[in-house]
Image (cartoon, rainbow, N blue to C red):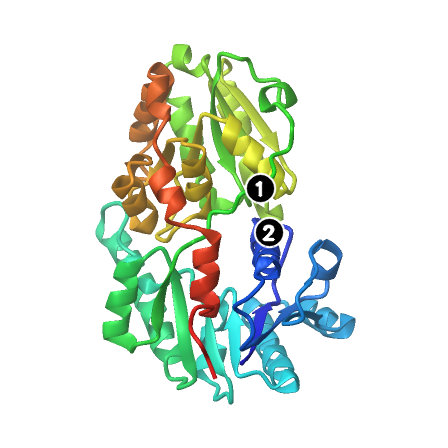
């Protein structure tokens, strides 16, 4: 069986580059299990410079779209236009390679294109943001309508996507409830996929020394691609509400590449926080962080903050925190909240609850022992090899 694995939107934001690097690395390590297939990866042109890992197995290949094709994608001013153009390229390369299955590593943006198409190949992929978990956060009729409308729009897109009879395996990360419910509603194409927790070689640095954080300060970490979703405005308001005696014992460390159109909002929030709470140490590091440095940050911080705004799915950072037995402050909503509660991985509350966040921060600073959890059951149940077997069906013989 010939499979084409596609991601034409890889950027040095977040960790999708590390995600694909690890998939290729794990496939390279497979001495067997690939006899009945040929796997080709298709990426946008800039990935060639940063991929850093090459196939060493005769069943694995990597292709890149041409420079001209990449330039045409970059000219698209609307995201919907870019995704439509990417879908045409995926179909083109799938035809050239005569593949039987296309696996899209981020399926969400292609729902319209898939629903409008008929394809000679099977269509599979990872679907990150299904309608099923969307629920109302906060009160008020207008607020309830906002979330209801969002959910209905997502559901309509899913119905449209499922018109394509070539849909094969649509994977949802860490959410068997959503898989079961959506299979009943939309047809039996949705599959459970465990979000893998990878092990990276940590960078041999001390973050307290790097960021000049006092040895007695309790470090709260906000990490990743820094944009509105990180909910920093609300978190800053919660830190403003701290007793100064608590603030003097804490540090808020914000590390990751800041989205360009969010820089002014972030700067305003941080400056106001520093003025309101001068005894609090606030540090920002606006750059892309590699996987090894991420490992170091999570191993040496005290509590990662995962209080994302309007976020209802799983987060790979929960797994990194669990691996290092770090309690998280997480949104109580969606899969992230459910996993945090089920595996006892930290404290959950509404991402809009300023006083509640402040109370949790105070509790953690005053009772530092509560920042430690046993994350091993979650870590061990999300192995990269299980993920690989599920995504590629490596234990299933295919024609």
Instruction: Work out whether 128 lies above or below 298.
Output: below
Distance between the alpha carbons at the discs numbered 2 and 1: 10 Å
Q: Which of label 2 and label 1 is nearer to you?
A: 1
Q: Earlier in the sequence, mark 2 or mark 1?
A: 2
Determine whether label 2 and label 1 are within 8 Å by CB.
yes
- Residue beneath disc 1: 200
- Residue corresponding to mark 2: 18
Residue 58 image-quadrant placement: bottom right
Q: Residue at x 55, y 45 (%)?
A: 225
- Asked which secondary structure carries label 2, the reply is helix
Q: Does residue 152 appear left or right of residue 50 in this picture?
A: left
Q: Position of residue 49 (x, y in %)?
A: 75, 57
Identify which residue is drawn at 35% across, 55% down: 174
Count residues near mark 1 (Cα–Cα under 10 Å), then give few for <14, some for 14-19, many for 20+: some
Q: Could you classify mark 2 by the number of other residues whose Cα lies within 10 Å: few (under 14), some (14-19), or many (20 or more)?
A: some
Q: Is residue 158 above or below residue 217?
A: below
- Side of 38 where 111 appears, left or right: left
Is residue 149 visible in the rendered image? The answer is: no
Is 344 or 90 nearer to us in this picture?
Answer: 344
Q: Is residue 373 visible?
A: yes
Q: Nearer the viewer, residue 303 or 387?
A: 387
Pinpoint residue 82: horizontal percent, then vertical percent.
60, 71
The spot of residue 213 in percent (x, y) is 57, 17
- The residue sitting at 26% across, 43% down in the picture is 342
State the image coordinates of residue 396 (x, y, percent, origin top left): 42, 73
Direction front: furthest residue: 32
Q: On screen, 42 above or below 177?
A: below
């Amino acid at each position: 069986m010939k499979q084409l694995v596609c991601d034409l939107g890889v950027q040095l934001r977040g960790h999708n580059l590390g995600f694909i690097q690890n998939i290729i690395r794990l496939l390279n390590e497979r001495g067997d299990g690939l006899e009945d297939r040929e796997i080709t990866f298709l990426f946008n042109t800039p990935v060639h410079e940063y991929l850093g890992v090459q196939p060493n197995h005769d069943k694995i290949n990597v292709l890149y779209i041409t420079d001209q094709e990449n330039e045409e994608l970059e000219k698209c001013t609307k995201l919907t236009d870019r995704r439509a153009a990417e879908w045409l390229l995926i179909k083109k390369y799938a035809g050239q390679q005569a593949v039987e299955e296309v696996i899209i590593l981020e399926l969400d943006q292609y729902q319209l294109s898939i629903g409008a198409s008929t394809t000679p190949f099977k269509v599979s992929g990872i679907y990150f943001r299904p309608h099923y978990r969307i629920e109302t956060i906060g009160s008020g009729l207008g607020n309830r309508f906002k979330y209801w409308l969002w959910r209905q729009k997502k559901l309509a897109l899913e119905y449209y996507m499922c018109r394509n009879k070539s849909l094969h395996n649509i994977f949802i990360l860490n959410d068997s409830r959503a898989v079961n419910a959506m299979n009943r509603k939309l047809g039996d194409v949705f599959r459970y996929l465990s979000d893998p927790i990878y092990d990276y070689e940590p960078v041999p640095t001390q973050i307290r020394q790097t960021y000049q954080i006092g040895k007695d300060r309790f470090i709260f970490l906000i990490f990743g691609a820094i944009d509105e979703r990180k909910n920093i405005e609300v978190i800053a308001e919660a830190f403003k509400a701290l007793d100064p005696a608590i603030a003097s014992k804490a540090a808020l460390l914000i590390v990751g590449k800041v989205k360009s159109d969010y820089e002014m909002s972030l700067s305003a929030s941080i400056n106001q926080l520093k003025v309101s709470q001068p005894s609090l140490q606030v540090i920002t590091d606006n750059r892309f962080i590699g996987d090894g440095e991420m490992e170091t940050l999570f191993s040496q911080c005290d509590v990662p903050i995962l209080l994302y705004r309007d976020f209802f799915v799983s987060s790979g950072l929960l797994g990194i925190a669990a691996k290092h037995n770090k309690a998280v402050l997480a949104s109580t909503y969606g899969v992230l909240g459910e996993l945090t509660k089920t595996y006892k991985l930290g404290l959950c509350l509404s991402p809009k609850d300023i006083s509640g966040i402040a109370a949790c921060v105070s509790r953690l600073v005053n009772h530092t022992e509560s920042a430690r959890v046993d994350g091993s059951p979650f870590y061990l149940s999300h192995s990269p090899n299980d993920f690989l077997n599920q995504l590629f069906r490596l234990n299933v013989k295919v024609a």
